[in-house]
Amino acid sequence: MACAVNGCKNLKRFKPKGVTFYRFPTGSLLNEWLRVLDKGSKWQWTNKLICSEHFSQNDLYTVARHIINYCY
Ligand SMILES: [Zn+2]
């Protein structure tokens, strides 16, 4: 599964070093992610992942608090 961010080449199956993959969050954080990614509400996010390269340390902390499913 590939990172959902346009132009990002990270693939989960290649297990890139130091990169963690996250599922999309639920609730209000989901809308925020879709807005940041410039995706409409119809965009199919349920089977998508985003890799840790698109988060700052602070963001990761926020994500970690909100996210339900981690992907390792
Ligand atoms: Zn990525």
Image (cartoon, helix red, strand yellow):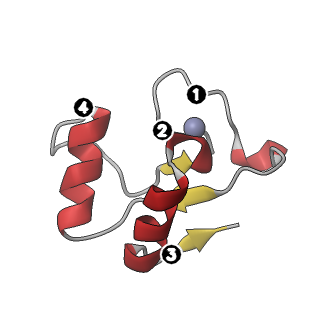
| Residue at position x 20%, y 70% in the image | 27
Position in image of residue 9 (x %, y %): 65, 27
Q: Residue 24 — which label?
A: none
Q: Which residue is mark 1?
A: 8
Cβ of mark 1 under 8 A from ligand 1: yes
Quadrant where ligand 1 appears: top right
Q: What secondary structure is found at the residue carrying circle 2?
A: loop
Direction from residue 60 to residue 29 in the image, left or right? left
State which quadrant residue 59 falls in. Answer: bottom left
| Residue at position x 72%, y 50% in the image | 19
Q: Earlier in the sequence, mark 1 or mark 4?
A: 1
Contact between labelled residues 1 and 2, with CB atoms less than 8 Å apart: yes
Identify residue type, mark 2: Ala
Identify residue type, mark 4: Asp
Q: Which residue is mark 3?
A: 69
Q: Which residue is mark 4?
A: 38
C-alpha separation, residue under disc 1 versus residue under disc 3: 21 Å
Contact between labelled residues 4 and 2, with CB atoms less than 8 Å apart: no
Crowding around mark 3 (Cα neighbors within 10 Å: few <14, some 14 to 19, many 20+) is few
Q: Residue 4 — which label?
A: 2
Cβ of mark 2 under 8 A from ligand 1: yes
